């Protein structure tokens, strides 16, 4: 008995795709079935392998659409007109690729042939719609592409007017064949010398099975690099279950549809490289799925809902944000309203936005974005870089379509920009953090028009106008791209859900980026060091200090000592030499970054690193990066002076092989993409967004250097693995905000600030009248100074009360500055107090009641020893894949929390400090005998003794190794040999004699 079962073979997937695109399958054509879908079924016999062209459909398209141009060539060249056209086609495609002829057409003698009619816009004439309908989309199965091997074929090829757009190899997991392995292998094994597989001859080569899709734009044998083209599932890699079919069905149901592919060709695919470069040296950019998806969702939502909306795009590093921003900016200028009742709609055939402004928080992206948008734009002079205030003002007033500026430039010039409330803007903000959550955003909104003639309005109207100007303007939509949204970013730009939560408009998570291989897992090999200190009193008396503050002050004192920095720098350099340089990580090109607490520490570290490298014969060089000048120990330093070349050259110089280590404080912790970075040494508190951004400097993939997750290494002297996990967890998958900030805290803060009588309300009102009346700044000073004098002197406030009031004033300004732009109501008194406090706060003087005593503390102690011990070695830090929900800003007023504090004597504080940091080592010294033989035994059992000392024939490196071994042994045996250790640490002559004695004993072989 024959039982009919489902066809689960590879051919079934071919047929499913063909049927969806054409309405039938090749096997049914013989029975008289006619294709009804948007695609035609092509014949493999019509494919010319030498030209990589479906010649039957190519000539049919030209005859149907451009017969007159063909006739001119036929008349002059009756015997060879076809050869003339195909010859010119082949020559041009070899030089510039099929993308060029699709977008620019094919010139032959005095004729010009359009090879693709673009998809129409809302403003397009009927002729454009008719032309697009004349395109011939076709799919051909089993295309025989090789003359050398006639039986070799590719499963499917999609053609547009006979030109190959896309090749597709299909696999079926049910027959134990996957696209991830077998499909990619099949392409890697193909003969890339076949015309169809020449770079640029087709736009993209894809392989798909029932679950996943992968793509490559350049076939290079074993070196071919495939990217996933998947939706993502559970905030990770792969695709979600599809209740109506295969997981990968979106490929043919959505992406392969004619309008979709036409849009990709017109607005997404980019051939990168200089015009003078040969085709083989260029790079074809085809959008990944999340890039295509986010841009199309933004355009669709804008067309359906009009102007005045906010969009938070949470895209991880490695998502290709620069290209996503480029594609969004270019296409937003041609987005039209779906109906006339939408906000900002002026006509159905008029674009919603007059201009798109791209604001990037990273100066280094400015040029990249400008160059990319110019590459995509067919019309010249639509992009205006705003390098100065006059540039931005002129660009806005002259209606430039895309204006690119930086957040550093924007606020400075905003006051000079004309009232543009009649214009419509899309504002794309790159890496939206707090800089866009407060005053900088306020300034941007003011630039886009206040809605009131400030010269005619009375003072109260002027205040209301300024408050409205800080609202999210109704004439602008805001698109914020970030990998690490804070609670304020979520509240300002996120999409509010029915339950009151805020979520991103679109997500591409860190988890997905890691699983797809676009970034590496920087937490896979994490080593922490615990610092051990011993502090000695240097005075006999025993004063009292606030315990908690004293402990904090002591740690800062120890961490900044040159002895401490030298110890850590030695460990860093030795580790980098062993694990990166000598191990030839990244094919001998691996680099490292040292992250320090501030510029002073960076300078001290740089000097220590340079000294360590000099001891080793300068095998490579280091660089330092910081902004501005810094005076240290009476000497003024700058990045340019310390590196020996201009500051703007540091990035390019560091890329050279001679420079391997970069010492930084804050500079280059964000927006610095150096794929050769594989090691990071951290001596800085890293929390939340900064932790993710700083450590993510390592995660850039570098396939050409063979960079893998196991090549990454972080050595952390400051943070615990628990600290880092807590910082990364919120951004590993999706980040949401539980609810909106409760702005009622502003009532409480205002009441607390009104109470002491620092200001009279009439003074606040008068200040605002003068300020918004544009009076000279000298007219403001008396009002501010009178209030400052009351706070500082006249009211005779206690230090604790002053601290409390200044904290509350800052909290009021911060919360109101962030919330005014999204509050649904207005409180005029809050606005007035906001502006008054902004000018008053800098003049309010406060002092910690215990500051003098704490300063004395550092004079009362000496650093007697410093040691380090690994607490976690190469430990992977696992992140939580669950959705992270952030809490809104603290709704409670803040203030001084000092109180009396717990006080201990200096002796108790030092003992407590040593107990904490030495963890079980004796803090009260007790004299003991020197056990010389025990020291010798410890030296002999040291892990480096045999290889680096005993069996080392190089006297220089052997001496270095011996010093390192002795330091390690003395630190480890410090408890047992305390007196010896102190002599060793404080008396250089004793240390030299002792080392020589140990060496002689070892040489004697006793």
Image: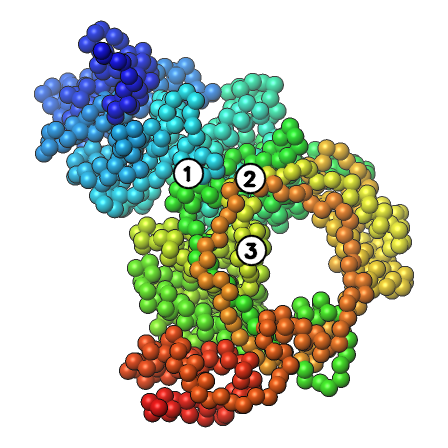
Left of 498 or right of it: where is 135? left
* Nearest-to-viewer mark from 3 and 1: 3
Which is more toward the observer, 880 or 184?
880
Provide residue 351's location: percent of width, then percent of height.
52, 26
Residue placed furthest toward the front? 1
Residue placed furthest toward the top? 32
Mark 3–mark 1 Cα distance, whole angstroms, equals 26 Å
Which is more toward the observer, 462 or 633?
633
Residue contact at pointers 3 and 2, CB within 8 angstroms: no
Residue contact at pointers 3 and 1, CB within 8 angstroms: no
Which is more toward the observer, 935 or 947?
935
Q: Residues within 10 Å of mark 3 (few under 14, many from 20)?
A: few
Mark found first going from the N terminus, 1 or 2: 1
Query: Can you say whether 559 is above or below 1005 in the image?
Result: above
Q: Which residue is mark 2?
A: 883
Q: Which residue is mark 1?
A: 237
Left of 168 or right of it: where is 524? right
Mark 1–mark 2 Cα distance, whole angstroms, equals 16 Å
Residue name at image x 38 percent, y 81 percent: 940
Provide residue 534's location: percent of width, then percent of height.
60, 77
Q: Residues within 10 Å of mark 2 (few under 14, many from 20)?
A: some
The C terminus - image quarter:
bottom left
Query: Can you say whether 879 is above or below 611 in the image?
Result: above
Q: Which residue is mark 3?
A: 722
Element class at badge 2: loop
Residue 331 visible in the current orientation: no
Provide residue 666's location: percent of width, then percent of height.
54, 60
């Amino acid at each position: 008995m024959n039982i009919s079962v489902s066809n689960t073979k590879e051919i079934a997937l071919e047929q499913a795709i063909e049927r969806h695109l054409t309405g039938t399958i090749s096997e049914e054509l013989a029975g008289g079935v006619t294709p009804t879908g948007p695609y035609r079924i092509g014949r493999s016999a019509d494919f010319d392998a030498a030209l990589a062209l479906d010649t039957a459909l190519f000539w049919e398209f030209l005859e149907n659409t451009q017969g007159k141009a063909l006739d001119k060539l036929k008349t002059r060249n009756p015997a060879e007109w076809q050869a003339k056209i195909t010859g010119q086609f082949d020559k041009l495609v070899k030089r510039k690729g099929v993308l060029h002829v699709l977008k620019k057409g094919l010139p032959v003698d005095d004729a010009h042939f359009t090879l693709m009619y673009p998809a129409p816009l809302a403003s397009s004439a009927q002729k454009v719609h008719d032309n697009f309908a004349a395109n011939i989309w076709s799919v051909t199965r089993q295309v025989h592409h090789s003359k050398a091997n006639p039986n070799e074929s590719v499963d499917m090829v999609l053609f547009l007017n006979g030109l190959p757009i896309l090749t597709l190899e299909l696999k079926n997991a049910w027959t134990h064949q996957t696209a991830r392995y077998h499909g990619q292998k099949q392409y890697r094994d193909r003969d890339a010398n076949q015309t169809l597989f020449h770079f640029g001859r087709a736009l993209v080569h894809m392989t798909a099975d029932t679950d996943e899709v992968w793509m490559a734009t350049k076939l290079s044998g074993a070196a071919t690099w495939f990217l996933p083209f998947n939706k993502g599932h559970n905030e990770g890699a792969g695709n979600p279950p599809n209740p109506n079919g295969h997981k990968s069905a979106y490929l043919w149901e959505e992406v392969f549809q004619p309008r979709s592919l036409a849009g990709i060709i017109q607005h997404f695919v980019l051939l990168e490289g200089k015009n003078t470069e040969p085709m083989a040296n260029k790079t074809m950019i085809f959008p990944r799925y999340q890039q295509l998806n986010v841009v199309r969702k933004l355009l669709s939502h804008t067309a359906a809902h009009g102007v005045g909306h906010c969009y938070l795009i949470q895209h991880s590093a490695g998502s290709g944000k620069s290209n996503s921003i480029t594609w969004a900016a270019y296409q937003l200028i041609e987005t039209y309203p779906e109906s006339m009742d939408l906000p900002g709609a002026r006509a159905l055939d008029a674009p919603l936005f007059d201009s798109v402004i791209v604001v990037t928080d990273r100066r280094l992206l400015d040029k990249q974005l400008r160059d990319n948008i110019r590459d995509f734009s067919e019309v010249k002079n639509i992009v205006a870089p705003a390098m100065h205030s006059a540039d931005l003002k002129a660009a806005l007033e002259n209606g430039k379509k895309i204006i690119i500026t930086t957040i550093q430039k924007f606020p400075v010039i905003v006051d000079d920009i004309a009232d543009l409330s009649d214009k419509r803007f899309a504002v794309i903000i790159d890496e939206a953090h707090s800089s866009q959550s407060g005053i900088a955003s306020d300034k941007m909104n003011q630039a886009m028009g206040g809605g009131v003639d400030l010269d005619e309005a009375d003072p109260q109207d002027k205040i209301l106008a300024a408050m409205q100007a800080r609202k999210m303007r109704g004439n602008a939509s805001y698109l914020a791209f970030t990998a690490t949204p804070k609670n304020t970013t979520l509240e300002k730009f996120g999409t509010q859900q029915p339950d009151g939560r805020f979520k991103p408009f679109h997500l591409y998570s860190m988890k997905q980026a890691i699983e797809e291989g676009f970034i590496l897992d920087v937490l896979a090999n994490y080593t922490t060091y615990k610092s051990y200190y011993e502090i000695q009193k240097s005075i006999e008396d025993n004063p009292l200090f606030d315990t908690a503050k004293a402990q904090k002050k002591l740690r800062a004192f120890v961490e900044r000592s040159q002895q401490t920095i030298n110890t850590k720098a030695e460990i860093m350099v030795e580790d980098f030499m062993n694990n990166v340089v000598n191990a030839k990580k990244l094919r001998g090109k691996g680099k490292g970054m040292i992250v320090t607490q501030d510029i002073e520490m960076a300078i001290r570290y740089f000097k220590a690193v340079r000294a360590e490298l000099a001891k080793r014969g300068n095998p490579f060089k280091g660089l330092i990066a910081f902004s501005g000048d810094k005076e240290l120990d009476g000497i003024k330093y700058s990045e340019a002076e310390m590196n020996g070349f201009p500051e703007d050259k540091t990035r390019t110089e560091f890329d050279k092989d001679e420079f391997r280590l970069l010492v930084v404080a804050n500079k280059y912790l964000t927006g610095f993409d150096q794929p050769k970075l594989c090691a990071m040494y951290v001596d800085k508190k890293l929390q939340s967004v900064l932790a993710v951004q700083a450590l993510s400097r390592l995660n850039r993939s570098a396939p050409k250097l063979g960079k893998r997750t196991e090549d990454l290494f972080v050595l952390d002297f400051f943070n615990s693995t628990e600290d880092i996990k807590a910082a990364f967890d919120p951004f590993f998958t999706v980040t949401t905000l539980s609810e909106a900030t409760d702005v009622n805290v502003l009532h409480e803060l205002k009441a607390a600030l009104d109470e002491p009588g620092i200001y009279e309300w009439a003074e606040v009102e008068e200040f605002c009248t003068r300020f918004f009346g544009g009076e000279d700044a000298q007219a403001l000073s008396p009002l501010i100074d009178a209030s400052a004098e009351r706070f500082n002197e006249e009211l005779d406030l206690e230090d604790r009360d002053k601290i409390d009031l200044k904290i509350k004033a800052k909290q009021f300004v911060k919360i109101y500055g962030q919330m005014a732009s999204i509050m649904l109501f207005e409180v005029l008194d809050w606005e007035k107090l906001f502006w008054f406090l902004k000018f008053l706060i800098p003049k309010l003087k406060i002092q910690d009641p215990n500051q003098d005593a704490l300063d004395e503390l550092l004079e009362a102690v000496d650093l007697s020893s410093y040691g380090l011990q690994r607490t976690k070695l190469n430990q992977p830090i696992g992140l939580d894949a669950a959705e992270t929900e952030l809490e809104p800003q603290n709704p409670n007023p803040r203030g001084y929390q000092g109180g009396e504090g717990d006080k201990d004597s200096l002796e108790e504080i030092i003992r407590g400090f040593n107990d904490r940091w030495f963890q079980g080592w004796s803090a009260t010294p007790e004299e003991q005998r020197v056990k010389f033989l025990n020291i010798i035994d410890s030296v002999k059992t040291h892990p480096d003794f045999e290889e680096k000392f005993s069996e080392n024939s190089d006297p220089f490196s052997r001496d270095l190794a011996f010093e390192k071994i002795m330091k390690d042994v003395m630190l480890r045996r410090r408890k047992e040999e305390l007196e010896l250790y102190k002599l060793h640490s404080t008396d250089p002559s004793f240390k030299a004699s002792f080392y020589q004695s140990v060496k002689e004993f070892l040489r004697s072989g006793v």
